[in-house]
Image (cartoon, grey):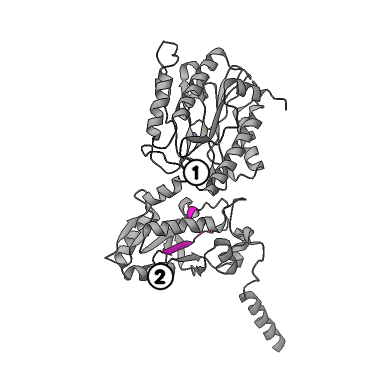
């Protein structure tokens, strides 16, 4: 009897005491999807700049929640601005920054060993989270936060701390994008608690900061670009009549992952024949025929940085005279833009240069000029997002990274040609980050016909 009682007590003791924490290396407990990241110092510098820009009050940054249940599979994606300032991929984390005090407080969930059997070992508040993030003050979210209807519902803890700061009269700085977001809801509920609440939107500062790529960001972008260039080199040798578009797509995805890129930055576009004239064709189901041109618009995502590089290939390995004529006009338009590319011009200005070039060279089957067949933008900013933050009317500045991607699409002739490269704006002009990939029609043909 006595022994049974002890056994029950022992069993209860083991059942209730937490299992020993996993001692896997910290990178395997950070929830990360990337194999290459910037040092903690990089993110600290960004937070310091954000604090300088805010100047006072309290800055709130909220990471994305993870409401996948036990039976769900899928991929957690951190909110991109939160990642930019923290490098943290732990779900349900929150950052408070106090510019006047130069204080950073990070909230992350306590470890939950039974849940970790499903979701993998995690970092909880503690020494190794401090080392990993470079943030000294790490506190628990205390489970004081619940997920309801796929939304994060703050209960106490970080929310209460925030409210107490705001009740002292501190201004609230946060990033408000669009008109409906978690942050908008949060501001509404905070106004109930603190009627005198003063709110400042840091969105314009965020855009300013994210546009100017640091050395580290250029390094990661270059890696994403180099992997994408390699994918083009590999798939260029796969074209022949009878091959399906998805087989080209498969080679791109294989090369991305084979080099450690976490994903495609966007669904690969492999459009042949008529579909070469469809801008965002991504079904990639058609069997390619002799005489087709094929637009291949692909980009790897590496360390969360995106590439976006387009080349146009002739299925047979050789462009027809007409295809070559159109190709050379697109190439000429790209060269005209790149010659002009320098700080002070806007993307809007660049489009006019490309349009004027295309509209003054060649003609369609009815003798009309070709400007009407250039139907999209010439460029976009690129970085953590394929279409990164920044306005097409804003003058370019050193540190901007943009695409230059003229195209001509003539459905009647089933000819679509696009050439897209990536440029880093410098003090005096630009540097092409995708320069090592063949670009002229002749170079493309040569690349396609290299022996496997
Ligand atoms: Mn693009």
Instruction: Give percent across and percent down for residue 30.
Output: 59, 59
Task: Judge: label 2 CB < 8 Å from ligand 1.
Answer: no
The front one of 231 and 248 is 231
Residue 219 seen: yes
Residue at screen point 58% across, 54% down:
32
Distance of mark 1 from mark 2, alpha carbons?
34 Å
Instruction: Give percent across and percent down for residue 138.
Output: 51, 68
State which region is magenta: 84-98
Mark 2 residue crowding within 10 angstroms, few (<14) / some (14–19) / many (20+)? few
Q: Is residue 55 magenta?
A: no
Task: Judge: label 1 CB < 8 Å from ligand 1.
Answer: no
- Which quadrant would residue 239 be assigned to in this image? top right
The front one of 219 and 204 is 219
Instruction: Give percent across and percent down for residue 432.
Output: 53, 34
Query: What residue is shown with label 2?
Result: 161
The front one of 42 and 272 is 42
Residue at screen point 45% across, 11% down:
365
Residue 68 seen: no
Residue at screen point 62% across, 30% down:
248
| The furthest residue to the bottom | 2
Query: What residue is shown with label 1?
Result: 383
Locate residue 449 relative to residue 284 in the image: left or right. right
Q: Is residue 94 magenta?
A: yes
Q: Secondary structure at mark 1?
A: loop
In what quadrant of the picture does the C terminus appear? top right
| The furthest residue to the front | 428
Mark 1 residue crowding within 10 angstroms, few (<14) / some (14–19) / many (20+)? many
Instruction: Give percent across and percent down for residue 93.
Output: 49, 61
In the rendered structure, which disc, 1 or 2, sits on the residue that comes first in sequence? 2
Task: Please tell me whether residue 71 is drawn above or below residue 446 in the rendered image.
Answer: below
In what quadrant of the picture does the N terminus appear? bottom right
């Amino acid at each position: 009897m006595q022994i049974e009682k002890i056994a029950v007590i022992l069993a209860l003791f083991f059942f209730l005491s937490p299992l020993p924490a996993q001692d896997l290396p910290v990178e395997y407990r950070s929830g990360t999807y990337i194999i290459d990241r910037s040092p903690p110092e990089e993110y600290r510098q960004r937070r310091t700049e954000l604090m300088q820009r805010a100047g006072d009050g309290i800055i709130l940054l909220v990471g994305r929640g993870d409401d996948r249940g036990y039976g769900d599979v899928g991929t957690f994606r951190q909110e991109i601005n939160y990642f930019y300032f923290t490098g943290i991929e732990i779900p349900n984390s929150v950052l408070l920054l106090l510019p006047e005090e130069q204080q950073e407080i990070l909230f992350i969930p306590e470890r939950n060993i039974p849940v970790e059997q499903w979701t993998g070992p995690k970092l909880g508040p503690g020494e190794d989270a401090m080392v990993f993030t470079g943030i000294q003050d790490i506190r628990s979210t205390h489970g004081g936060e619940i997920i309801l209807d796929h939304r994060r519902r703050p209960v106490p803890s970080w929310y209460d701390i925030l409210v107490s700061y705001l009740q002292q009269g501190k201004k609230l700085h946060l990033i408000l994008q669009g008109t409906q977001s978690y942050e908008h809801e949060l501001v509404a509920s905070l106004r109930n608690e603190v009627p005198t609440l003063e709110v400042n939107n840091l969105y314009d500062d965020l855009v300013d900061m994210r546009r100017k790529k640091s050395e580290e960001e250029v390094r990661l972008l270059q890696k994403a670009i180099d992997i994408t260039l390699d994918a083009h080199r590999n798939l260029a040798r796969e074209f022949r009549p009878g091959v399906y578009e998805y087989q080209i797509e498969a080679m791109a995805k294989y090369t991305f992952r084979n080099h450690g890129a976490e994903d495609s930055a966007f669904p690969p576009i492999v459009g042949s024949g008529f579909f070469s004239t469809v801008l965002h064709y991504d079904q990639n189901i058609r069997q390619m025929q002799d005489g087709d041109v094929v637009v291949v618009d692909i980009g790897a995502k590496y360390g969360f940085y995106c590439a976006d590089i387009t080349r146009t290939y002739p299925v047979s390995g050789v462009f027809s005279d007409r295809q070559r004529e159109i190709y050379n006009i697109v190439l000429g338009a790209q060269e005209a833009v790149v010659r002009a590319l320098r700080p002070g011009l806007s993307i809007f200005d660049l489009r006019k240069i490309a349009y004027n070039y295309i509209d003054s060279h060649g003609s369609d089957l009815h003798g009309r000029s070709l400007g009407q067949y250039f139907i999209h933008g010439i460029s976009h900013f690129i970085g953590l997002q394929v279409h990164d933050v920044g306005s097409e009317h804003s003058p370019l500045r050193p540190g901007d990274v943009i695409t230059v991607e003229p195209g001509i699409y003539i459905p009647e002739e089933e000819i679509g040609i696009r050439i897209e490269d990536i440029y880093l704006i410098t003090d005096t002009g630009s540097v092409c980050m995708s320069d090592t990939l063949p670009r002229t029609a002749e170079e493309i043909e040569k690349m396609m016909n290299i022996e496997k």
